[in-house]
Amino acid sequence: MKLNEYRKKRHFDATPEPSGSGKAEIARNEGGRRRKSFAGRSCWEAGIRPYSRTKVEMMRNRIPFLAHPMLATLVPDPFERSGWVYEEKYDGDRVLAYKEEDRVRLLSTNGKDRTRQFPRIAASVRILEPVTLLLDGEVVVFDRKGVSRFQLLQQDKGEPAYALFDCFFHDGEDLRREPLSMRRAVMEKSIGFSKVLLPSHRLATNGLEAFRIAKRRGYEGIVAKDLSSPYVEPRSTKWLKVKVHQEDEFVIAGFTKPSGSRQYFGALLLGAFEEGKLRYVGKVGTGFDQKTLAALYRKFQPFVRSRPAFVDPPREKSVVFLAPQLVAQISFQEWTADRKLRQPVFLGLRDDKDPKEVLLPEMST
């Protein structure tokens, strides 16, 4: 249906007509339908709801889909390829920012609303010029050396920033099929210069050099991206990540009771799924302050159970088992030969992760 026909069918033309009488006048519009004209008054004053937007305009002011973020595939070693770029891998919370006119929503990977949690970021997105905008990035808190730390974000120790690396909807246009090079240019133009909205840091044109820079500066790793790649959901080999430091998510399925002066619990029992079964990968007893110990202990109580969720539970005394409902972010030195974590440290909870998505990695032989 053409725009004019749509307007004729759905709405009366309530545009005021010139008149000195101040009384309602009867007239006919182009389609022969009767309309009212209220001389000297707006249609709102006359009690008539005006036709404000066309269907096309409404579509331009809304994002017609909910997206799942494009995820990078983990590879063991850095590399160099023509037509690829190499960015800093951030240690934070992945968030998609939806801007529809003055309305802004910040959604996590699993669709949880983060708008109230990060009001400064939402406000910064709201004032951007495009009417509609869908941005992809990581909410982070930097330490004194400019390195993002998930633990600082979890503990509210610092002002969050939004490190942006993609834009796949802009002013009514779906950009998901466009190459990354074009989407990045649109993103950079849209956000301009801001202390809160930051374009992701590209380290070097050579992937091997980028990895050396990341290692020297203490970054979590690098993300390599094919500049010709479309935006693909959810995981793609057009984005590849290489880790400098070992860090991953694990399921919490129990805890040991405290000893000595320790309160609430001693260590967390961690696991990961393999072929649908939860495997025990070790325990973590560091990375907690008193406030974290108390908060976690309270959070555990609804999930206490008598039997272990592990198919291979640890042989330890004074253990309390939990239903596998919570996910922790853990840093560690390495995997042992028997697939256990060496020197793990607790960084925080991940409420944007489904426990079933926490899989035991394949070990190289």
Image (cartoon, rainbow, N blue to C red):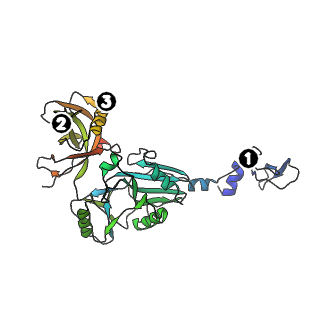
Within the image, what quadrant is residue 292 found in? top left
- Residue 27 is left or right of residue 59, and the answer is right
Residue drawn at (37%, 62%) of the image: 200
Q: Quadrant of the N terminus?
A: bottom right
Residue drawn at (72%, 52%) of the image: 8
Front-most of residues 50 and 128: 128
Residue 351: give x, y in percent of width and height: 34, 42
Q: Which amino acid type corresponds to the residue marked 1 in the rendered image?
A: Trp
Crowd band around label 1 with a 10 angstrom C-alpha radius: few (<14), some (14–19), many (20+): few
Q: What element carries label 3?
A: helix
Q: Name the residue under label 3.
A: 302
Q: Which amino acid type corresponds to the residue marked 3 in the rendered image?
A: Pro
- Of badges 3 and 2, the one in the foreground is 3
Front-most of residues 146 and 163: 146
Residue drawn at (55%, 57%) of the image: 131
Mark pair 3, 1: CA separation: 54 Å
Q: Mark 2 points at which residue?
A: 311
Crowd band around label 2 with a 10 angstrom C-alpha radius: few (<14), some (14–19), many (20+): few
- Residue 101 is left or right of residue 24, and the answer is left
Mark pair 3, 2: CA separation: 22 Å
Crowd band around label 3 with a 10 angstrom C-alpha radius: few (<14), some (14–19), many (20+): few
Q: Mark 1 points at which residue?
A: 44
Residue 59: give x, y in percent of width and height: 57, 54
Q: Is mark 1 on a helix, strand or loop?
A: loop
Q: Is mark 2 on a helix, strand or loop?
A: loop
